[in-house]
Image (cartoon, rainbow, N blue to C red):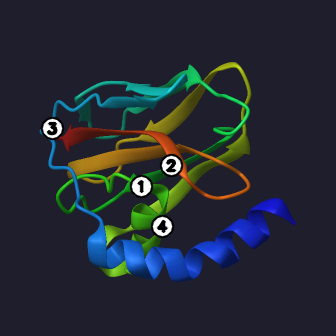
Amino acid sequence: MGMRMLRRGLLISAAVAMLTAVPIVSSGASLRASHSGHATLVLKGPRTNKMGASFNYTISGTATRTANYLIAWEQFYPQGGCASTYAGESVRAYFDSTYGLTLFTDRSVSGSYSMREQFSAEHTGKHGLCAYLVSSVTGTTYAWGGAFWNNVK
């Protein structure tokens, strides 16, 4: 019930966030990290991948009692970087032909966490990973990160 209610509750806040969220512009070499209080999130992975290759991104950081849920999407069509909040990024899921978001991670975390997400370089061009450490109760974003790479021939 927790995440289902969170998603429903975020629909209205997501609409508001869509009007107010300011996307972060980042280079193809982006390895962004942020933190709020003791909650942290860091993304690490390659900047360039050859077509057909598999590669990994690591999502790691520190969760707290309130910052306890991790959500990450791949942006198939990056449009100016990741939104600075989970609500802002989640609105983009409704615009598939614009952002091409694919949900990669959606899980509870606690303490120090680290997970590896595997990708395949199947399409040329720029792609991105946007991750958010949020409260499973309120949806408040406590930390976020964005990383972008290019798949080349």
Residue under numbered circle 3 = 28
User: In the image, what residue type sits under mark 1?
Assistant: Thr
Dot 3 alpha-carbon crowd within 10 angstroms: few under 14, some 14 to 19, many 20 or more:
some
In whole angstroms, how far apart are the C-alphas of marks 2 and 1? 6 Å
User: In the image, what residue type sits under mark 2?
Assistant: Thr
In whole angstroms, how far apart are the C-alphas of marks 1 and 4? 9 Å
Q: Residue at x 66, y 71 (%)?
A: 7
Query: Closer to the N terminus: mark 1 or mark 4?
Result: 1
In whole angstroms, how far apart are the C-alphas of marks 4 and 2? 12 Å
In whole angstroms, how far apart are the C-alphas of marks 3 and 4? 22 Å
Residue under numbered circle 4 = 90
In whole angstroms, how far apart are the C-alphas of marks 2 and 3? 24 Å
User: In the image, what residue type sits under mark 3?
Assistant: Gly
Residue under numbered circle 2 = 141
Tag nearer the camera, 3 or 4: 4
Dot 1 alpha-carbon crowd within 10 angstroms: few under 14, some 14 to 19, many 20 or more:
many
- The numbered mark at residue 145 is none
Dot 4 alpha-carbon crowd within 10 angstroms: few under 14, some 14 to 19, many 20 or more:
many
Q: Residue at x 40, y 47 (%)?
A: 130
**Is residue 134 visible to the viewer in this orientation of the structure?**
yes
Q: In the picture provided, is 147 more to the left or to the right than 112? A: left
Q: Secondary structure at mark 4?
A: helix
Q: In the picture provided, is 106 more to the left or to the right than 89? A: right
User: In the image, what residue type sits under mark 4?
Assistant: Ser
Query: Closer to the N terminus: mark 4 or mark 2?
Result: 4
Image: 85 above or below 42: below
